[in-house]
């Protein structure tokens, strides 16, 4: 007889703790990888299936694959919502198929006693290993109402071999379902994603979609492609997580739409630490070996929008209050996005020739000539970056960049190209270099109705050490219907002045009350 274990005792959790040192401690803070211990684990008194009652050893040597599979199926057959892993290291030795090794079960979660003491690990010696846990959507079309907590998932990357292009060994993937929560876990050493939600390239709209996802209080370490990928999802939160180590070819969090037949909506990423100061990007990116990577990336690639016109199936994302070391946020062809309260600390690296990233700390750009790209706000961010611009906008309308603090960028603090919107109350200092001075805000291209007001820019140094030339510089002709309004901006110790108009369109802008401090 298979036994059921009633968990009535509180389980004492010990989270992994490792102190990480960013590259520039004067501009950032070290932080602990200690994971938040969720009281729901220690209070787990509901009936669970113990994997050891199904033959698992957890001794770090025995192949426990079949025991884990058996426990999952037994729980499903008996209406039990959870399987339980006592402390130990559970080896997964089977190879599985292209989909993965262990099939997830609808309505059945997994609980361990904490990622410091409970481990599920792939055996080594594999070539291009398959994903660990996955949804077999032919037999299980939906995975819903699942909680996964208190487990360290380890892909054992150093003991595997890979083709250079291989990036599909994921810890856990769910293509269709709802109400998925992953908390107080660790994901490490996977040649793919830590977590993957949603499916792509479907023949009909949202044929498979995941809704109601929460990922929180987890650690992601040495994940090759992405810590977590959201594609074809509606409603997801990624918060209080720590992302660090080597890898992250595409980014820490990837919010990516692939086709017109999928929606990627309402994803929130907040209160996370992205510390890329303790590892390097994959060599497959090309160029020099650098730490700088994308913390959060959003995009619609491949064929893009139908007829090149933005639709309502991408966006409404919120990226806020994240701490980012040696990293950036980018947004490609996505609309209705808020980027607020994020802190960036980037020391100089030469990223020439490195793929999968760009120089600006925040990059909002059109990469495919789409129309209707609107409503991006980048407000109240603190940016110290010695790599590129602080914030860049390209070919968007109805944007805002308000209340940002930008320091020490080698290029212009805010770069505006073919974009209209409001730029208000930004404080920009010490941008540019001695060899190539830069401006607080640079405006290029056609933009109708720009409003640029109450910004401050300048140098904290004097004399020949100054690098900021103007508060606002217009670098090219603007054929927008409504001329820009440039009002009440202030400069301090600028090299050349407050506002520089384009020399072929003098007196085109509506400028007033722009003064030196």
Image (spheres, rainbow, N blue to C red):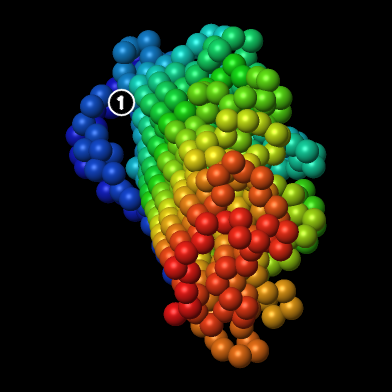
Name the one closer to the observer, 89 or 461. Answer: 461
Q: Position of residue 497 (x, y in %)?
A: 58, 76
Q: Looking at this rendering, what residue extends furthest in the front direction?
A: 507
Residue at which label 1 appears? 48
* Visible residue check, residue 509: yes
Residue at figure coordinates x 29%, y 22% from the top left = 4
Q: Position of residue 466 (x, y in %)?
A: 61, 83
Name the one closer to the observer, 447 or 229. Answer: 447
Q: Position of residue 119 (x, y in %)?
A: 47, 43
Count every numbered label the image shows and give the total. 1
Q: Position of residue 170 (x, y in %)?
A: 60, 34
Label 1 CA crowd tier, 10 Å (few <14, some 14–19, many 20+): many
Residue 441 occupies quadrant: bottom right
Residue at figure coordinates x 30%, y 48% from the top left = 37
Q: Is residue 509 left or right of residue 350?
A: left
Residue at figure coordinates x 47%, y 22% from the top left = 210
Q: Is residue 127 left or right of residue 101?
A: right
* Visible residue check, residue 146: no
Quarter containing the C terminus: bottom left
The secondary structure type at the circle numbered 1 is strand
Residue at figure coordinates x 61%, y 19% from the top left = 260
Q: Is residue 82 left or right of residue 404?
A: left
User: In the displayed structure, would residue 360 be above or below residue 296?
Assistant: below
Name the one closer to the observer, 448 or 381. Answer: 448
Residue 396 occupies quadrant: top right
Quarter containing the N terminus: top left
Name the one closer to the observer, 171 or 241. Answer: 241
Residue 30 occupies quadrant: bottom left
């Amino acid at each position: 007889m298979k036994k059921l274990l009633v968990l009535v005792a509180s389980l004492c959790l010990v989270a992994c703790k490792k102190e990480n040192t960013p590259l520039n401690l004067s501009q950032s803070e070290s932080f602990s990888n200690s994971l938040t211990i969720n009281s729901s684990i220690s209070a787990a008194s509901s009936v669970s299936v113990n994997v050891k009652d199904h033959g698992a050893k957890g001794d770090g040597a025995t192949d426990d694959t079949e025991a884990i599979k058996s426990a999952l199926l037994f729980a499903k057959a008996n209406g039990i919502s959870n399987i339980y892993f006592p402390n130990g290291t559970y080896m997964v030795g089977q190879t599985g198929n292209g989909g993965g090794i262990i099939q997830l079960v609808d309505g059945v979660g997994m609980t361990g006693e904490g990622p410091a003491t409970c481990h599920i690990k792939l055996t080594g010696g594999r070539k291009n290993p398959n994903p660990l846990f996955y949804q077999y959507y032919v037999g299980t079309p939906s995975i819903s109402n699942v909680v996964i907590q208190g487990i360290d998932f380890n892909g054992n990357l150093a003991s595997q071999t890979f083709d250079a292009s291989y990036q599909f060994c994921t810890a856990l993937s769910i293509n269709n379902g709802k109400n998925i929560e992953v908390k107080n876990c660790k994901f490490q050493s996977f040649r793919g994603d830590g977590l993957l939600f949603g499916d792509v390239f479907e023949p009909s709209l949202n044929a498979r979609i995941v809704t109601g996802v929460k990922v929180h209080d987890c650690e992601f370490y040495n994940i090759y492609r992405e810590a977590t990928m959201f594609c074809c999802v509606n409603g997801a939160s990624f918060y209080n997580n720590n992302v660090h180590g080597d890898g992250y070819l595409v980014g820490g969090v990837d919010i990516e739409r692939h086709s017109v037949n999928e929606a990627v909506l309402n994803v929130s990423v907040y209160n996370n630490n992205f510390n890329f100061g303790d590892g390097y990007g994959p060599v497959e990116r090309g160029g020099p070996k650098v730490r700088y990577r994308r913390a959060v990336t959003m995009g619609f690639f491949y064929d893009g929008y139908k007829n090149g016109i933005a639709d309502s199936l991408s966006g409404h994302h919120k990226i806020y209050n994240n701490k980012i070391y040696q990293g950036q946020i980018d947004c490609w062809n996505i609309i209705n996005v808020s980027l607020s309260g994020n802190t960036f600390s980037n020391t100089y690296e030469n990223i020439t020739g490195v793929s999968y990233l760009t120089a600006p700390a925040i990059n909002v750009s059109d990469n495919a000539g789409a129309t209707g790209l609107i409503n991006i706000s980048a407000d109240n961010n603190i940016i110290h970056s010695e790599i590129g611009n602080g914030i860049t906008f390209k070919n968007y309308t109805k944007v805002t960049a308000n209340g940002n603090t930008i320091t020490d960028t080698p290029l212009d603090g805010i770069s505006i190209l073919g974009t209209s919107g409001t730029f208000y109350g930004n404080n920009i200092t010490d941008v540019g270099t001695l060899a190539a001075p830069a401006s607080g805000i640079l405006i290029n291209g056609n933009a109708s109705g720009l409003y640029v007001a109450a910004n401050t820019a300048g140098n904290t140094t004097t004399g020949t050490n100054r690098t900021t030339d103007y508060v606002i510089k217009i670098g090219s002709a603007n054929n927008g219907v409504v001329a820009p309004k440039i009002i009440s901006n202030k400069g301090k110790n600028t090299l050349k002045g407050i506002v520089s108009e384009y020399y072929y369109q003098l007196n085109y802008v509506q400028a007033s009350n722009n003064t030196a401090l």
